[in-house]
Image (spheres, helix red, strand yellow):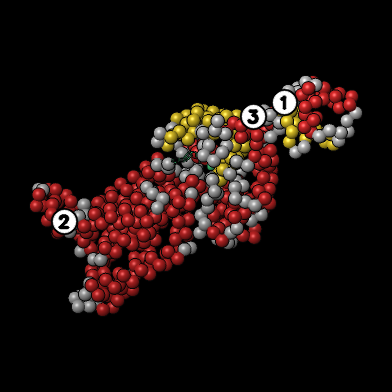
Amino acid sequence: MQQMIKIKSLCKSFGSFSAVNNITFDLNKGDILGFLGPNGAGKTTTMRMLTGFLKPSSGDVIINNRNMKDNPEICKSFIGYVPEGAPLYEEMTAIDFLKFTAKIRKIRKENLEKTLENVINLLNLKKILFKKIDTLSKGFKRRVGLAQAIIHNPEILILDEPTDGLDPNQKNEVRSLIRKLGKEKAIIISTHILEEVNAICNRAMIISDGRLLLDDKPNEILKKSTSYKSIYIAIEEKNSFDLKNEILNKKISKDVSVRNNQCVIKTNNSKSVKSNLDEFIKKNKFTLKHYSIGKGSLEEVFRRLTSDE
Amino acid sequence: MSNFFYSSYLIFQREILSYFSTPIAYVFIAIFLLLSSLFTFYLGNFFELGQANLSSFFEWHPWLYLFLIPSVTMRLWAEEKKTGTIELITTLPISSSSIVIGKFFASWVFSSIALLLSFPLWITVNYLGEPDNGVILASYIGSILMAGAYLSIGSCISALTNNQVIAFVVAATISFLFTVSGLPIVLDFFSTWSGQILTDTIASFSFLTNYSDITRGLIDLRSLIYFITLICLFLYTNILIITNVRD
Ligand SMILES: Nc1ncnc2c1ncn2[C@@H]1O[C@H](COP(=O)(O)OP(=O)(O)O)[C@@H](O)[C@H]1O
Ligand SMILES: [Mg+2]
């Protein structure tokens, strides 16, 4: 696996305020990393150091085996970046702006036409090419922002809240594009929308107050959720409160609650709880009104880790 | 090195394009031409002097540039900081210096275009009499150089803020100080309590002093070096600011 990004003990302070505190991680080709955290967690600041916009207070950013500190221009050439809010030169037309980016990205004259055609098709920009960017809709602006980031087919793509402010359809378009690009790149996308991580990422990080709290595959993080493999059950014969009491009495599980007229039984991922419960149901010949097993909730883990207490 | 020039050129090209894709450029050129002719004909006694030359045109340039140039440069960096495009441009694989240089030359070429559009005046004096065209050429060169100096001050100040109004006011103030340091009032003030050497030094740092030498047709190497050094100094500071102050 090819290592694209290596971050070592990255810190950034603004005055006495520490916005990013000792973050370390690697990113390989094929990784689509969801960078999660509440507002003010330090996501943007971290990405700004990764792209060479901000200088770290301490620590190193290594891009493709080169240190950003020593070789900023080479490092930057491997990266495509959509900054927070996807800023653009609004007085330019979309095509002029893309040509400008392509030339600065050192795309050769003989390849220019083809390169432009590729991103224009990929992002469906044909209709708006000759319009000034400030007259475009938010969705098209974002697509132009993405187009400038991928025009040089970078190995690393860094997207700061790429779907922020878009409507649900536009969000889906951006997500499917990222999924399409993901296979041969290393991608970091920051977001505070948790469904986004499930939809596109194969790795997720949770940061809060500038610290890295968790770094794992999304389905591994789900296992940390208290509702992971919880059993949701309701039966015809008893109301859920009586059922709850009986389950507690029979010592099937110590942690049972009632929500939406269903008993929620925490299993802590142990198989015996489920088999004991199944046996209990069978023996009493209860008719099941509802029976499901919890998939876990990223949101719950996120809230548990990032809430203040 | 060729990389540096190529990126500077691309930045330059983008900037020039953006000047002319907004009304700012046309408004600026119109106001410059309007005011400079107004000053020339009403305040400069162009007709009464009865001489076929453009000195009454050129003599007002420091005062025009004083507020017109900061209005060109105020957006140069402050706007990029405000809209966030500075994050785009500085994460491209080019050096900060090529961006600074590209932007500066775009603003310089733009201002020079405004200045050179005053050519009908030059045609007029040649029609009316026999002016010393060497002096006029020198004056154009001096005016362009001085504009460059004002532009470099404005660009550097604009890099320090994301507020265009602040950029304008501070740049105009600093430009004012560089301009008036050659006026008799200022020099008298200094000579009352300091020695002749300091007074002369202050005078030699004045735009007025250096510029008026050139417009009299006296292209003094010292004046050329003065303006060019000043431009380099401010652009160098500008590069340092853009490279280091992003927070
Ligand atoms: N230039 C700056 N000066 C001072 N504080 C800053 C600056 N940039 C960011 N911060 C602070 O650093 C913290 C992290 O910000 P940011 O990285 O933008 O968070 P996120 O992107 O996760 O919402 C915030 O508290 C923010 O106020
Ligand atoms: Mg952010």
Examine the image and state in which quarter residue B129 appears: bottom left
Residue at mark 2: chain? B
The residue that appears at 45% across and 33% down in the rendered structure is: A18
Q: Which residue is more in the foreground, A40 or B79? A: A40
* Mark found first going from the N terminus, 1 or 3: 3
x%, y% of residue A243?
A: 80, 30
Q: Could you say which quadrant of the image residue B113 lies in?
A: bottom left
Nearer the camera: disc 2 or disc 1: 1
Q: Which mark is residue A216?
A: 3
**Residue, disc 1:** A255
Say few, some or many: other residues with alpha carbon within 10 Å of mark 1 (under 14 / 14 to 19 / 20 or more): some
What residue is drawn where x is 69% and y is 43%?
Answer: A180
Q: Label 1 to label 3, Cα distance in Å?
A: 27 Å
Q: Label 2 is placed on what type of residue?
A: Val
Amino acid type for the residue under numbered disc 3 = Asp
* Mark 2 and mark 1 residues within 8 Å of each other at the beta carbon: no
